Amino acid sequence: MSQLIRCRKCDEVFMRTPFDQYPLYSNDQDHPIEKFQFIEKDDFKDFLNLHQGHPLERLDIIEDSFVSEKAYFEPVKTSFFKATNGKEKFVVKKFRERIDEPVKYQLIFGDYSLKCATIEIQSEEITKQLKREIFPPPSQTQIDAFLKLYQHMVNEKSSHPLKVYYKLDDFHLMYLLRNCHNIFKGSDYSRMEEFIHRHRDDGVLLLKASFKIQITERIKGEEKALFPVSNLKEEKVAIKK
């Protein structure tokens, strides 16, 4: 449904979609709102005219390479994905600064990686859940000691999967339970052990990780056009009805 086109001379990219020829409608403030002005447009044709005589090629978007600095449903955000011409890979930056402006694309020579910036425990949620589920509830001193132990254990982990929330592995679960013996005694420990197992997989003990997108740029190399301009002009974008 979509095609990513690159001008090899200018290193500009265009995302060709079935909506490139959709008209615009605007109304004059001096006329009733029901009267709209019909404006024809062809964004892909404008791109070809702007880069007339330049070598163009089609880039294939690499599957599962999309990352975003904000939630996917946010209309105003900066995102990145990878694309290739069959010989080398590129990073494409997709962004817009206001909701009323079109999405822009920028070609970057290089790659990106995801670096874990922070790992947090859900301190407030854990405290509330402990007081709600365990009777008699642990003292505030015990709760603070448990939170400190949990955060200390989390900070020792070095790498994590790309998930907003994820659960402890078996090794760190055993570490947490073993050290809880220093905070909780007797029946208090038994209740705490049940609490930890109960919330390990999908509760307040899930860990929250935040990642940074790091771009590594490289110098532009020598390439050959894979798709001549004439071929791109003749291609059609299929629209499902």
Image: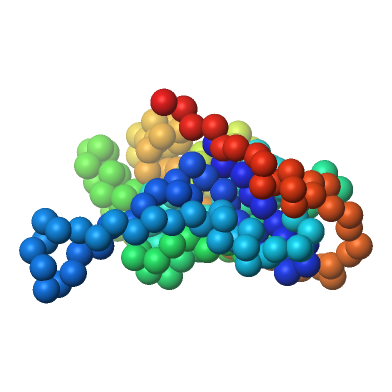
Residue 213 x, y percent position in the rendering: 61, 61
Q: Outermost residue, top direction?
A: 241
Question: Colour scheme used in the picture?
Answer: rainbow
Residue 182 in the image: state x and y as whole percent: 49, 49
User: Where in the figure is residue 173, as x and y percent of width and height?
Assistant: 55, 38
Q: Is residue 9 left or right of residue 48?
A: right
Write the residue at 43% across / 56% down.
Answer: 41
The residue shown at (52%, 63%) is 104
Q: Residue furthest bottom?
A: 30
- In the image, is residue 187 above or below residue 163? above
Q: Is residue 186 above or below residue 180?
A: above
Tell me the residue at 68%/65% (across/down): 51
> Quadrant of the image for the N terminus?
top right
Residue drawn at (67%, 47%) of the image: 233
Q: Nearer the viewer, residue 44 or 8?
A: 44
Question: So how many labels did they put on this image?
Answer: 0
